[in-house]
Amino acid sequence: MTASVMSRRTVLAAGLAALFGGAMTGCGTSGPKSGGTAGGGASVWILSGVTEQAFRNSFTGWNDAHPDQRFSVQAFANDPYKQKVRTAVGAGQAPTLIYGWGGGVLDSYVKAGAVEDLSDLVADPHVKNRFIPSIAAGGKIGGKTYALPNNGIKPVMVYYNKDLFRQIGAEPPKTWDELMSQVADFKRAKIAPFTVSGQAKWPLLPWLSYLMDRIGGPRVLNDILAGKHKAWSDPAVTEANEKIQALVDAGGFVDDFASITTDSGADVALLYTGKAAMTLALPSAYQTIQQADPKFIESGKLGYFPFPAVTGGKGDADDVVGNPSNYWSISASASDADKEAARAYLKNALLNSQYVGDLLKEGNVPPVADLGPRIAKSSDPDYFTAVYHMAAKAPNFALSLDQALGPKAGDAVLTNLQQIFLKEITPEKFAANMNATLSG
């Protein structure tokens, strides 16, 4: 390695250390170096679970057809991955293709020079015309493209057990007040209204995001992302947390929700086994049920509806929270040969026909243009159409808070929101704690 290359990587690591703080602690020399494995070559880390096989199929197909540009593939559970990849990026040891969510985390990578500018790729009509433009925009920072969509559209909605709704004679609530009334009805029937994984923390985020939006509109989050002074003290944030704690007080969640995991599907299992009536979740909930109990879907027992409106709120009832998609970026620390392999893969194999079919088969709606004919031939056209249209018609699609914010603020909102759900802090304390991240 030349002195100039060593110098560039030293600067890169220093910049990332400043951005990620403790995420680099103890990074040592573990993990792939220069975007490769110990044996060299391009590398990629994927998430284990419901969409894993679609990713594996794509890279297996690519490797078979391109033996000189092969990728090594490793899978990690969601939460361990998020910590591991930040450490690896900070140490200049990221995989060649970096799996991400866009937002503030991608912005931090861009500011540190950790990812490649892919604007030349999307200038190619063969690539540009493949994606829904609004979803592809999630990979842009400062007008340039640093990431391309690699996964399905992920709006959060309420999934519900129709049998349990019939037991109390209920229909999907359209307002927050109706939802709270149904919570009381479910409790009287000895049915847990909602299941949620409190242990993982991130499944709690949509509750805050949706309520902030329904109460105050997109401006609330926009002010936070802009770093506006005391933006977390906005009345809409405080009211959102008050409503969350009122829901907890009303017994809105299954007992011991703080100990329930999500990577194993334990939270969603309570829905399809009849232990809980609803869950506010990403499409991964559908995928989990599809794998664990497909008859629950096939028999028409699974329902879904958008997050209710808040009476008097400023937000549009069609606004959506979640992840527009997931994205691939190319590590700036990768070798030239590995970067070339990554670019070739993104140009020719990303969300191609086979990839799209695999995602649909796994209950995922790809963010590609002209998907209608494929959806019509899928296993559940009604559901896939609902997801597709929900994202397409949304006036505002807010990215999950832990990804929309920078790494440090993202960690802080996870910790503080969990404390809100556990009634360990007040909404005012939450605001004060989060305001402290705005200047950091």
Image: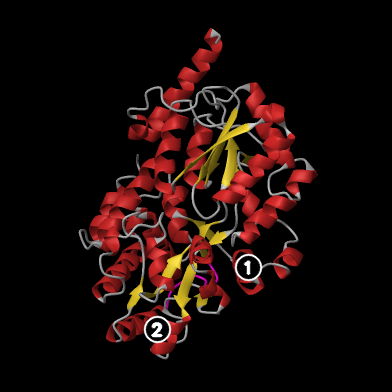
Residue 244 to residue 417: above or below: below
Whole-percent x, y for residue 204 in the image: 37, 60
Instruction: Give yes or no for contact between labels 1 and 2 (Cβ–Cβ under 8 Å).
Output: no
Mark 2 closeness class: few <14, some 14–19, many ≥20 residues within 10 Å:
some
Which one is nearer the viewer's eye here, 209 or 153?
Answer: 153
* Residue type, numbered disc 2: Glu
Name the residue tied to disc 1: 384
Residue 92 to residue 231: above or below: above
Q: Main secondary structure of the magenta part?
A: loop
* Residue type, numbered disc 1: Phe
Query: Is tag 1's residue or tag 2's residue first in the polypeptide sequence?
Result: 2
Q: Which residues are magenta?
A: 311-319
Name the residue tied to disc 2: 178
Whole-percent x, y for residue 150 in the image: 62, 48
Whole-percent x, y for residue 158 in the image: 47, 71
Asked if residue 145 is among those painted magenta in the image, a careful observer would answer: no
* Secondary structure state at the residue bearing disc 1: helix
The answer, for residue 207, to whether it is visible in the render is no
